[in-house]
Amino acid sequence: MQRIYLKGIHKDFYREIELIASLFFEEVKVTDSLAEPVDAVLQFSIKEANPASVTVLLSEPSGEQTWQAFHQQEIQETDVKAYRKRLKKLISYTVLQVFQQATGIIQSWGILTGVRPTKLLHSMLLKGSKATEAAQVLQREYLLQPEKIEILQEIIERQLTMLPDLYSLDREVSLYIGIPFCPTKCAYCTFPAYAIQGRNGSVEEFLAGLHEEIAAIGNWLKERNLPVTTIYYGGGTPTSISATQMDALFTQMKRYIPTYNQVREITVEAGRPDTLEPEKLALLKQWQIGRISINPQSFKEETLKLIGRHHTVRETLEKYQLAREMGISNINMDLIIGLPNESMEEFQNSLEVIQELKPESLTVHTLSFKRGSIMTQNKEKYRVAKRDEIEEMVRMARVWAKQAGYVPYYLYRQKNILGNQENVGYAFPGQESLYNIIIMEEKQTIIGLGCGAVSKMVAPQTGKIKRWPNPKEPQAYINTYQQHIHGKLQTLDEMFGFSILA
Ligand code: SF4
């Protein structure tokens, strides 16, 4: 834990400073108290005039070494809130620079600490900026490195090619169905995923609730004449439930979801190869599920054991082959950079196997130590690659993807992601997942049904966003799903401007 003592700055700005400092150190606490020893001192001198300026002096507590950064900028905004927002950005900018000097680490994402950097670029383009102007702003004001700007631009272009109506999809919705079961729990996982074995009763009860939720949401969509753009079954691993249960679920969806036959894309996460049997694959084909995910994460046996996947490399390859033989024509695979004991060599090997398999899309995640995962709770047991190597692997994936004919089409970042890097979805052009674009760019309402499903409601016209999380835990869902249906539909009515249901 790095304790950083702050001087000469209002508490309102502490959060920004902590976020920027966290890009350089694993755990950071900013404080205005010297009651406990501190590791560094940040002294600010801020001029709230126009131009506004920020000077930051970073020093060791002994005062032996110091670093200084200064930045000033015209702030056009006169509204107090907007002015403050710009000032926060200016502070982040200066703090980043002083830490970059002190550590020698250049942050490729500059001062961007949020999950969805592509949203920023979309909003600039929506406000009328040209691509080149937007790129200059990202470099000048946000300190992004050219390679990150380039990937953002490529992604936006692919997104608008695949969804030319992305900015006007707000009068349709997409659906997310959360099935909270997996064969076992992976060590890095924080999704709602409960080991399915021995849970027969509660699986049935959960599914009964889910069927009710599907009927209620389906009726609501029908009454309000709202079409569905995409459907995504995630979790957990939806293919953990039995073939009979899957069949009943798809039947219920078809029965209640209006415009079901016109839905542009349906994806089922079949992430764990150990859940895939011929009968289930036949069902996916029969129900015209256009896209599935079979996720190797790594092609090294020891790694799979270490992270608790409980399936073998061979099983991944066999199930992939089987899915192909059974006619599944759009398969995504996930890899993770930075898994324990893995370096460039193992990752290179994983990419080579992917090159042979040629899935239609590949999502390259960078490992993140999420709070609450088994891995984070036992962090000392896992040895992961260093920052530089992680950066190299991310770069390697990008170069490899280009050569193999894949294009990047969505990107997101997470807290505590190794090397402050990102997760990138690559696909063969034309095979990009529309749902992934929609969820990242937050231009359309996604209604979440089932366990751990978070509805994200985007108000047409204003773009205002409200979240409605369903319970994560199956028993909590079983106990409360009816209240959630009711509350969710009321909120949806408000967000879409429909009259509130009696
Ligand atoms: S398969 Fe996915 S959802 Fe299931 S435990 Fe592993 S990471 Fe979590």
Image (cartoon, helix red, strand yellow):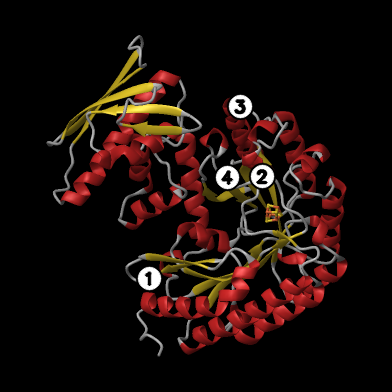
Where residue 88 appears, as percent x and y from the top left, is 27, 40
Tag of residue 374: 2
Comparing labels 1 and 4, the label whose residue is closer to the camera? 4
Is the C-beta of the residue carrying label 1 under 8 Å from the nearest atom of ligand 1? no
Identify the mark nearer the N-term, 2 or 1: 2
Q: Residue furthest front?
A: 35
Comparing labels 2 and 1, the label whose residue is closer to the camera? 2
Identify the mark nearer the N-term, 4 or 3: 4
What is the C-alpha distance between the residues marked 3 and 2? 21 Å
Tell me what residue is drawn at x 15 percent, y 52 percent.
79
User: Mark 3 = which residue?
Assistant: 386
Quarter of the image where ligand 1 sits: bottom right
What is the C-alpha distance between the residues marked 1 and 3? 42 Å
Looking at the picture, tell me which residue is in the foreground, 20 or 128. Answer: 20
**How many residues crowd mark 4 within 10 Å: few (<14), some (14–19), many (20+)?**
some
- Residue 145 in sight from this viewpoint: no
Q: Secondary structure at mark 3?
A: loop
Tag of residue 459: 1
Vertical position of residue 276 compared to residue 459: above or below: above
Identify the mark nearer the N-term, 1 or 3: 3
